[in-house]
Image (cartoon, rainbow, N blue to C red):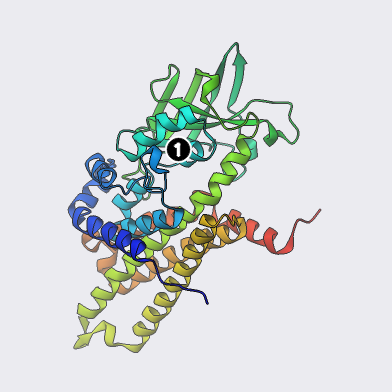
Amino acid sequence: MVNFELTQEQKDIQKAAREFATNEFTKERAEEADEKEEFPFDLWKKACELGFIGVHFPEEYGGAGMGIFENILIVEEFCRADSTIGSALILSDFSSEVVMRFGSEKLKEEVLPKVAGGKAITAGAYTEAEAGSDLTAVKTKAEKDGDEWVINGTKTFISNGTIADYFIVLAVTDPEAKPRYRGFTTFLVRKDAEGLSTTKIGKKMGIRASPTAEVVFKNVRVSEDDVIGELNRGFYHVLEFFDESRIEIAAQALGIAQGAFDRTVEYVKQRKQFGQPIGAFQALQHRIADLRTQLECTRLLVYKSAWNYDQGRIDPGLTSMAKYYAGKVAVKVCDEAIQMHGGYGYIGEYDIERIYRDAKITEIYEGTKEVQLNTIAKDVLGKFK
């Protein structure tokens, strides 16, 4: 018989994450981070000290040796408490899993303990101006020069770009490979590398506490030891990482949606019109009931994806379903939340407009909703020639 209950350890992790986030992610702090577009370094360090970041890293590298499931419980609770600060913190170790899964022992020992310990932030430098959904269009090149590699190219929309200590970079190493993605390799580049520069991309719609940047590599040199995984297998390494990261983004979307829902339920109980709380009107009750149902469906899908991953059952179709549906529900819940708040939902006083702005990105990054639908369709129908 299938057991849908969390273990006691998982409940404890969930509770600890909820208490930390509820106490620390204050409305005032979130508004400040959103308005100033500043990463909350102090809260990030606290989260690391308490073991919330990198919980899925092996113990020998500073983690707790837990699974993706435990990690997404933390992600959900952080983003439920506050979408702005929660999103910034859960992205602080972005792409470190590529090092964890494919990096050499030397790279793991250098990077992972620092990330888990609050001493380093990572960034995945994959996306380019002409290589978004189509990652096979990457143009950044890495050419061999003696015992070094020289990297040239420009990446864009890079999360943590201006604050990262380490960049995981996807570059072309065999331009003659056919198909061309069989000639891609992943590299580790440190922030102090000569020729590396970053430019902040400002005025984003949402997740403003998570800095986004353009990253330029101009004759950046790295050693042979900085190759992550196998030469010319970088594209596959990144795709495998996406199977994991998309579950995390689905959990982010779930948390954001739940947070918006929680706030809305409280509001409709208190807001009075025509002599009674608006929550007493059946039309609104039905909308609340529908959103609650969608949230529970989302949670089951996200949790199943994480559980499957931890069991070694990597299922890109299921992962894409979780990512697609969670993002869709997050935007839907936030849209309904604003409508139920009326004019108050359109101003900053009640957080909902900021949460809505933060929610939209979950339908875009780590593969757009259209890309997820393509993956799901291929999983069902197979490839057509």
On screen, residue 177 versus residue 326, left or right, reads right
Q: Along the line of sight, which residue is nearer the eye, 110 or 235? A: 110
Instruction: Give x and y (percent) for residue 20.
Output: 23, 55
Q: In this view, does 51 lie above or below 277?
A: above
Instruction: Give x and y (percent) for residue 230.
Output: 62, 31
Q: Residue tagged by mark 1? A: 158
Q: Residue furthest front?
A: 60
Instruction: Give x and y (percent) for residue 2.
Output: 51, 74
Residue 160 in sight: no
Q: Which residue is drawn at 29% across and 41% down?
A: 39
On screen, residue 169 versus residue 175, left or right, reads left
Q: What element carries label 1?
A: strand
Q: Along the line of sight, which residue is nearer the eye, 16 or 276? A: 16
Location of residue 130 by image quarter: top right
| Amino acid tagged 1 | Ile
Location of residue 175 by image quarter: top right
Label 1 neighbourhood size at 10 Å, few (<14), some (14-19), many (20+)?
A: many
On screen, residue 220 versus residue 262, left or right, reads right
Q: How many marks?
A: 1
Instruction: Give x and y (percent) for residue 70.
Output: 40, 56
Q: In this view, does 136 lie above or below 260?
A: above
Q: Along the line of sight, which residue is nearer the eye, 298 or 213? A: 298
